[in-house]
């Protein structure tokens, strides 16, 4: 407990899934958390849960594609708590799916805007603030899709999420001298709303489950624990990594 005592963290995509589980874990470990997402009601219920458990959190609703919203998240951290130590840029979308020859330019661009450009805009302002206070930890949510495994029909998702790995490496190299660490997690299948939207039948879920060495999908709390490690001082010499947290999907062929 208290691995993040006296730390201040931003979590985007916090209204559900991995983001919500991570925000709760960060708070339980002592961090003061600014939670961001589009849905105000879900954020308010998250803050209520964290507060009831003895933690401290502030909700700010908005669109991660907006640079002004990204700036506002950082400003809220500084105005309320005086600093920023951790940022988990987790908000994402599946984007327009289906045969790539039929994907629209607008659909492809939207996936890039939400999954990649928004994460850059967040990191741009997060890192600038962290560097003022001796460093920090920035974490992105990428995916195994388009890295170690491919599915048909999700080109926009794969391309935008793969771009986060290059961004991770570039930022880690650039800001390592300021003690800002930058890493990405690459989850396998996780039982979230997005997973259920992609796999909306028992047959589809059985197929995805079978791809994993562990023959199951993760729950969000399992991913949250890996994010906690990267956020904490336990990972003080870890930067520039693309960390597979994938239940063995990358190495399974049976």
Image (tube, rainbow, N blue to C red):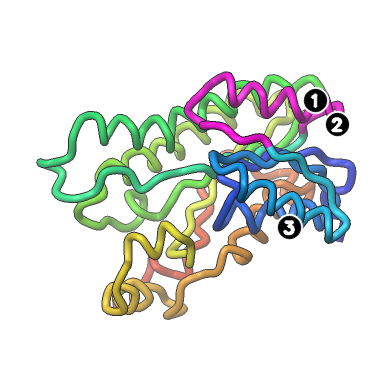
Report if the CB atoms under discs 3 and 2 are less than 8 Å apart.
no
Is 180 located above or below residue 140 in the figure?
above
Residue drawn at (82%, 55%), measured in percent from left and top?
29
Q: SS at mark 3?
A: helix
Task: Identify the mark at residue 102; answer none if there is no mark.
Answer: none
Q: CA distance from mark 1 to mark 3?
A: 21 Å
Q: Is residue 227 left or right of residue 54?
A: left
Secondary structure category for the residue under label 2: helix
Give the camera-side residue of 176 and 42: 42
- Secondary structure under tag 1 reads helix
Please determine whether, in this image, residue 149 is positioned above or below residue 217: above
Q: Mainly helix, strand or loop, the magenta region?
A: helix
Q: Are marks 1 and 3 in contact (CB under 8 Å)?
A: no
Query: Which residues are drawn in magenta?
Result: 60-84
Q: Position of residue 119 (x, y in %)?
A: 51, 32
Report whether residue 199 is seen: yes
In percent of width and height, residue 16 lies at 56, 55
Residue 134 is a magenta residue: no
Quarter where residue 228 is shown: bottom right
| Residue 78: assigned label | 1
Q: Which residue is mark 2?
A: 81
Q: Assess whether mark 1 and mark 2 are in contact (beta carbons under 8 angstroms).
A: yes
Per the rendering, the mark at residue 25 is 3
């Amino acid at each position: 407990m208290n691995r993040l005592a006296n730390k201040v963290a931003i979590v985007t995509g916090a209204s559900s899934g991995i983001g919500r589980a991570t925000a709760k874990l960060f708070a339980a470990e002592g961090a003061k958390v600014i939670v961001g997402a589009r849905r105000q009601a879900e954020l308010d219920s998250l803050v209520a849960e964290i507060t009831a458990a003895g933690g401290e959190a502030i909700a700010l609703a908005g669109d991660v594609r907006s640079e002004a919203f990204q700036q506002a998240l950082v400003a809220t951290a500084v105005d309320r708590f005086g600093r920023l130590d951790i940022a988990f840029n987790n908000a994402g979308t599946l984007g327009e799916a289906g045969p790539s020859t039929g994907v629209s330019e607008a659909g492809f661009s939207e996936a890039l805007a939400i999954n990649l450009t928004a994460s850059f805009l967040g990191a741009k302002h997060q890192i600038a603030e962290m560097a003022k206070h001796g460093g920090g930890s920035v974490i992105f949510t990428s995916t195994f899709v388009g890295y170690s495994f491919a599915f048909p029909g999700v080109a926009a998702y794969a391309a935008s999420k793969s771009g986060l790995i290059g961004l991770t490496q570039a930022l880690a190299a650039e800001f390592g001298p300021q003690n800002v660490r930058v890493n990405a997690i690459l989850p396998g299948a996780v039982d979230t709303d997005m997973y259920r939207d992609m796999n909306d039948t028992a047959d589809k879920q059985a197929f995805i489950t079978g791809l994993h060495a562990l023959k199951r999908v993760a729950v969000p709390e399992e991913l949250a624990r890996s994010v906690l490690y990267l956020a904490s001082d336990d990972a003080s010499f870890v930067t520039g990594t693309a960390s597979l947290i994938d239940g063995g999907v990358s190495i399974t062929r049976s």
